[in-house]
Amino acid sequence: MSAIPTLQLSSGTLMPVLGYGTWLSEAAEVAKGVKWAIETGYRHIDCAERYGNQREIGHALSELWKSGYKREDVFITSKLWNTRHDCPEESVRQTLKNLQLEYLDLYLIHFPEAFPRGAREEEMGSGKRDYAAVTLTETWQKMESLVDKGLVKAIGVSNFLVSEIQEILGSCRIKPAVNQIEVHPYNTSIPLVEFCHTNGIAVTAYSPLANQYFLTEVDPNNTRRPNTKDMTPLLQHPVVTKISEAHKKTAAQVLIRYVIDRGMTVIPKSMRLERIKENYDVFDFKLTEADVGELNAMNVNFKLVDPGWRLWPQQA
């Protein structure tokens, strides 16, 4: 299999364009997935405090270092959760302890919304923003200090739209290196991706297969989310399968390549070794402009990840 190309961030850090996602990975299983990914060839692991599995990932990484893999060869991302906007340093130090690391390659603000300490996710949001006495500008200044102290090599954001990025760009000393967002043919996010690229901000795409929870019931507390039972899963969509047959690749490989060919990095997730290997094997082909155009045309601005408390200031 081919080696993974890298993308240079505005910080100068090199980020592998393909990573292994750990969202929705059970703590009891995630260590196995991380080991399989690294052994397959992945050199980019995406984590987050909110996922509740960083301690187990840390054990896996420690065992990998002992077996001969080098820390400096693996790009590791984590994220600051909504209830911790007032204390990025405290949070990143706990993350480093859990992951058994001395530094992170990238640390992201997980969502723009900040909520009080101790708030459970089901308690978040009451029809108005609750920044718990901390603004995005103040949080970003604390994030910048993490770079100064050598705790992280680069900082960025996740699930931010244009106006929220502009709020940071208006006063930042270190601009966001990355914006991690949901991207797939049902949610192409073309204006947001173009804004980020124009401003030198890399984009990482999560949920590229749009597969998580796809056939579950609609959340009755979130009227924005359409009933996915009325939609064709991307892995079975005739446009995707047609392109996959033309390239002699799987539908999943086409969807991963779609993100890469749009100039983004991507973090698919799987807990099956054969799928981890399949998702890695995407560097021996490229989509045509026509392929990308057909996939772009499938856009319906559908977000699988759309928590009820998320207050979108605009559509993108």
Image (spheres, rainbow, N blue to C red):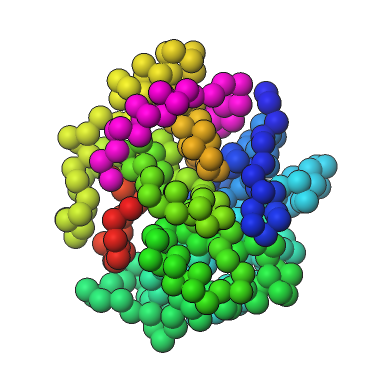
In the image, residue 82 sits, relative to residue 53, either above or below, namely below
* Residue 294 belongs to the span the image colors magenta: yes
Q: Is residue 197 left or right of residue 173?
A: left
Q: Residue at x 44, y 13 (%)?
A: 246
Q: Residue at x 36, y 23 (%)?
A: 240
In the image, residue 262 sits, relative to residue 284, either above or below, namely below
Q: Is residue 121 left or right of residue 255?
A: left
In the image, residue 13 sits, relative to residue 236, either above or below, namely below
Q: Decide if residue 187 is in sight here.
A: yes
Give the residues in magenta.
272-301
Q: Which quadrant: the N terminus?
A: top right
Furthest residue toward bottom: 133
Furthest residue toward front: 198
Which picture quadrant has residue 7? top right
**Which one is in front, 21 or 313?**
313
Q: Residue at x 55, y 43 (%)?
A: 265
**Which one is in front, 118 or 115?**
115
Q: Decide if residue 277 is in sight here.
A: no
Q: Position of residue 3 (x, y in %)?
A: 70, 31
Q: How many marks?
A: 0
Q: Position of residue 127 (x, y in %)?
A: 22, 73
Q: Position of residue 46 (x, y in %)?
A: 57, 50
Q: Is residue 60 left or right of residue 68?
A: left
Q: Residue at x 65, y 62 (%)?
A: 154
**Which one is in front, 170 or 206?**
170
Q: Position of residue 241 (x, y in %)?
A: 37, 19
**Which one is in front, 294 or 108?**
294
Which picture quadrant has residue 302? top left
* Residue 204 belongs to the span the image colors magenta: no
In the image, residue 303 sits, relative to residue 83, either above or below, namely above
